C-alpha cells in the first residue's frame, strides 16, 4: 500500500544540486570573514563544506516509502514497542550550527509492526534537515503514525545545541528535551508513564 505524505510533515523537497554552486558561495564567505580561500589550507575547503552540507541536509530528498521498503509486517501485537537512545545530529535553522542528542521512539501496534532498523532511519530523515528540535520531534512522531497507523506514538528527543554552547548565553552543559505524544500516549496517563519508565531506565538525561 503506498504511503501518503502529509505536506507539512514528510514532504520531499528537491533543491538544486549542481556540484560547485555551494562551494562558490563558500569561497565568497571565506573572503568576507577575512580569509584567503586560495591559500593551501583552504583550497579544498569550499568543496568539502558543500559535500558536508549536502550530507547534513540529505533528509530533504529521502523517500519514506523507499526507506520503509516493505518492512511493515502484519502481526497481532498490542504491547508497547520502544526504540531508545537513537543518536542524531542536526542543524539549527536559525544559526546553521549543529545540535545533537538522542531520540526515544515508542508505538502501540494495532495490526502492524515495523522492522526495528527502520525507526532510526526515519529519525535521520528529519534530523538531516535544517531544523528546530520541537518540529523535528513532532515530524518523527507523525511519520511513524502515518506509516503504521498504530494506537499511538510517543517521541522524546534530548539535545545539546551549539547555538547555546558556542555563542549567545554560552551554556555548555544545558540540554533541551522535546516530546510528541499521539493517540493513546496523549489520552492515557498510564501509557505515558509506561513509556517514560522504559526511557528513564538508562535513558533520559544519562549523558
Image (cartoon, rainbow, N blue to C red):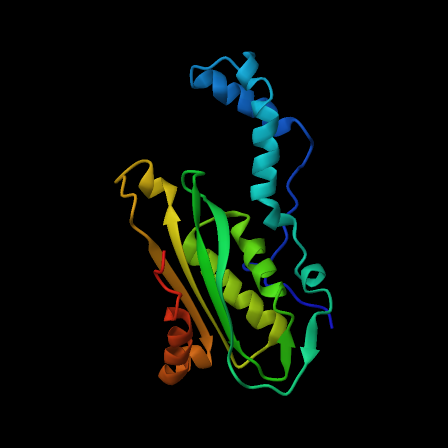
Residue 70 location (% of width, % of height) = 73, 69
Rendered residue at 45%/18% (across/down):
32
Image quadrant occupied by the C terminus: bottom left
Count of marks placed on residues: 0
Image coords of residue 102 (percent x, y): 45, 57
Image quarter in which the N terminus is found:
bottom right
x 68%, y 56%: residue: 63
> Which quadrant of the structure image shows residue 198?
bottom left
Instruction: Residue 169 in the image: state x and y as whole percent.
Output: 25, 40
Q: Please report the residue visible at 62 percent of the width from the left and 64 percent of the height from the top.
A: 117
Give the camera-side residue of 128 and 11: 128
Question: Relative to 36, does residue 100 appear above or below in the rendering?
Answer: below
Relative height, residue 41 to residue 182 (above, below): above
Q: Where is residue 41 in the image (x, y as percent from the top left)?
A: 54, 17
Left or right of 204? Residue 64 is right
Looking at the rendering, which quadrant does residue 26 occupy? top right
Q: Residue at x 49, y 68 (%)?
A: 105
Q: Is residue 115 above or below residue 14?
A: below
Amino acid at each position: 500500500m503506498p504511503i501518503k505524505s502529509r505536506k507539512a510533515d514528510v514532504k520531499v523537497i528537491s533543491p538544486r544540486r549542481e556540484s560547485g554552486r555551494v562551494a562558490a558561495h563558500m569561497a565568497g564567505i571565506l573572503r568576507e570573514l577575512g580569509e584567503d580561500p586560495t591559500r593551501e589550507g583552504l583550497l579544498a575547503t569550499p568543496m568539502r563544506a558543500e559535500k558536508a552540507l549536502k550530507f547534513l541536509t540529505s533528509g530533504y530528498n529521502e523517500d519514506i516509502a523507499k526507506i520503509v521498503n516493505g518492512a511493515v509486517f502484519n502481526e497481532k501485537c498490542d504491547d508497547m514497542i520502544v526504540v531508545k537512545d537513537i543518536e542524531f545530529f542536526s542543524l539549527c535553522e536559525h544559526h546553521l550550527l549543529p545540535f545533537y542528542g538522542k531520540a526515544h521512539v515508542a508505538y502501540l501496534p494495532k495490526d502492524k509492526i515495523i522492522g526495528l532498523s527502520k525507526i532510526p532511519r526515519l529519525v535521520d530523515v528529519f534530523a538531516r534537515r535544517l531544523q528546530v528540535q520541537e518540529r523535528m520531534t513532532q515530524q518523527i512522531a507523525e511519520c511513524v503514525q502515518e506509516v503504521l497507523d498504530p494506537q499511538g506514538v510517543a517521541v522524546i528527543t534530548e539535545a545539546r545545541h551549539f547555538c547555546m554552547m558556542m555563542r549567545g548565553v554560552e551554556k555548555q552543559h544545558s540540554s533541551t528535551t522535546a516530546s510528541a505524544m499521539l493517540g493513546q500516549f496523549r489520552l492515557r496517563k498510564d501509557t505515558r508513564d509506561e513509556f517514560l519508565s522504559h526511557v528513564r531506565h538508562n535513558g533520559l538525561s544519562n549523558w
